[in-house]
Image (spheres, rainbow, N blue to C red):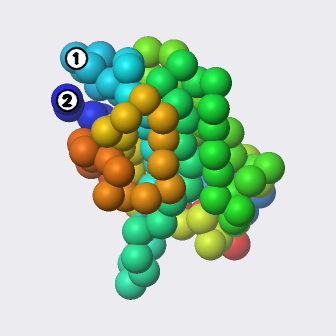
């Protein structure tokens, strides 16, 4: 599995970004996928997860109603109404099972992060 996260950047508060997570070998098609983020000086935290068919999604309370996770051959994180506190490096990860999880230990493969910076 070779995960590649992209789509990060600098945006003003209230703006939007769309992150993508792709696996060039398409080996995560039967697995849940999650997004996590880590801000400087803080622990990595769960953002969103999606099951292998996309039928089940889950979100952290801090992003619920603003972020949307979806998937086709890649996995996406649509981020709207961004806030300065959303600033972090965002990572996608492949779950051990067909559904996603809020716990980092349930993921086996991690992509390199993509930086999201939200200015006030």
Mark-to-mark CA distance, 1 and 2: 7 Å
Q: Dot 2, how many residues are within 10 Å of its Cα: few (below 14), some (14-19), or many (20+)? A: some
Q: In which quarter of the image is residue 43?
A: bottom left
Contact, mark 1 vs mark 2 (Cβ under 8 Å): yes
- Earlier-in-chain disc, 1 versus 2: 2
The residue under label 1 is 25
Q: Can residue 10 be seen in this view?
A: no
Residue 42, image x and y in percent?
Answer: 42, 80
Above-or-below relation of 19 to 101: above
Residue at image coords 71%, 62% = 61
Q: In which quarter of the image is residue 17?
A: top right
Q: Is mark 2 on a helix, strand or loop?
A: loop
The residue under label 2 is 1
Residue at image coords 48%, 66% = 45
Residue 55, image x and y in percent?
Answer: 64, 24
How many labels were placed on the picture?
2
Q: Which residue lies furthest to the bottom in this view?
A: 41
Residue 120 vs residue 78, the one in the foreground = 78
| In the displayed structure image, the side of residue 48 where residue 98 appears, left or right | left
| In the displayed structure image, the side of residue 24 where residue 100 appears, left or right | right
Residue at image coords 55%, 35% = 50
Q: Can residue 52 be seen in this view?
A: yes
Residue 10, image x and y in percent?
Answer: 53, 56
């Amino acid at each position: 599995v070779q995960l590649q996260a992209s789509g990060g950047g600098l945006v003003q508060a209230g703006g939007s970004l769309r992150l993508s997570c792709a696996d060039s070998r398409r080996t995560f098609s039967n697995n849940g996928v999650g997004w996590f983020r880590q801000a400087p000086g803080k622990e990595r935290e769960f953002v969103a997860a999606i099951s292998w068919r996309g039928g089940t999604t889950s979100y952290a309370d801090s992003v619920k109603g603003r972020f949307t996770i979806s998937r086709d051959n890649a996995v996406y994180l649509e981020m709207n109404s961004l806030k300065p506190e959303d600033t972090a490096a965002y990572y996608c990860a492949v779950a051990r099972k067909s559904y996603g999880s809020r716990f980092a230990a349930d993921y086996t493969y991690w992509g390199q992060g993509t930086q999201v910076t939200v200015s006030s």
